[in-house]
Amino acid sequence: MCICVQDKLNAGTPTAICLGCSLVAVGTSHGFVIMFDVLQVAKWSLGEAPLREAGGSVSSLAINPIGTRLLVGYAKGLILMYDLGNGKLIR
């Protein structure tokens, strides 16, 4: 039996996707961002509870050209930046 990351997190349905520098970012309707590497192995689940609730669903994603930063735009106007080296929120 296969259990996908989306089921484990109750992440909702995909709403945005971004490809860049051997990473795939998938934003969801419940405010999560799930990061995968080139082998389709889940690396991180980004999105702290208070920020997810404040922002709503993920509406846009962007990875910088060198693959070190991820910008996440939310439906309610919140924009967050993550470090893709360690998966931590920067600002």
Image: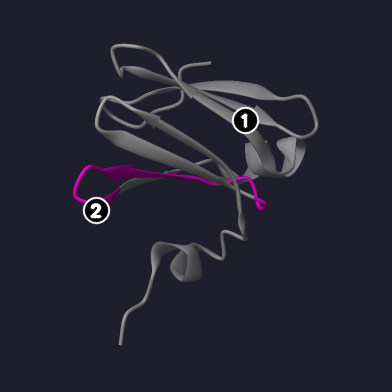
Task: From the viewer's perspective, tell me whether residue 39 is left or right of residue 63.
Answer: left
Depth check, front residue: 57 or 52: 57
- Tag 1, which secondary structure? strand
Task: From the viewer's perspective, tell me whether residue 46 is left or right of residue 13.
Answer: left
Q: Which mark is residue 81?
A: none
Residue 53's quadrant in the figure? top right
Depth check, front residue: 68 or 47: 68
Let me know if residue 51 is in the magenta part: no
**Mark 2 neighbour class, 10 Å CA radius: few under 14, some 14 to 19, many 20 or more:** few
30 shown above or below 37: below
> Which residue is drawn at the image coordinates 70% and 44% (left, top)?
57
Q: Amino acid at mark 2?
A: Val
Residue 35 position in % (x across, y down): 37, 42
> Which residue is drawn at the image coordinates 32% and 80% (left, top)?
2
Hey, which residue is sitting farthest bottom in the picture?
1
**Mark 1 neighbour class, 10 Å CA radius: few under 14, some 14 to 19, many 20 or more:** some
Mark with earlier residue (2, 1): 2
Q: Amino acid at mark 1?
A: Ser
Residue 67 position in % (x across, y down): 30, 19
> Which residue is drawn at the image coordinates 32% and 26% (left, top)?
84
35 shown above or below 30: above
- Tag 2, which secondary structure? loop
26 shown above or below 30: above
The residue that label 1 is drawn on is 60
Hey, which residue is sitting farthest top in the picture?
65
Q: Which mark is residue 41?
A: 2
> Which residue is drawn at the image coordinates 66% and 52% (left, top)?
30
Residue 48 position in % (x across, y down): 55, 41
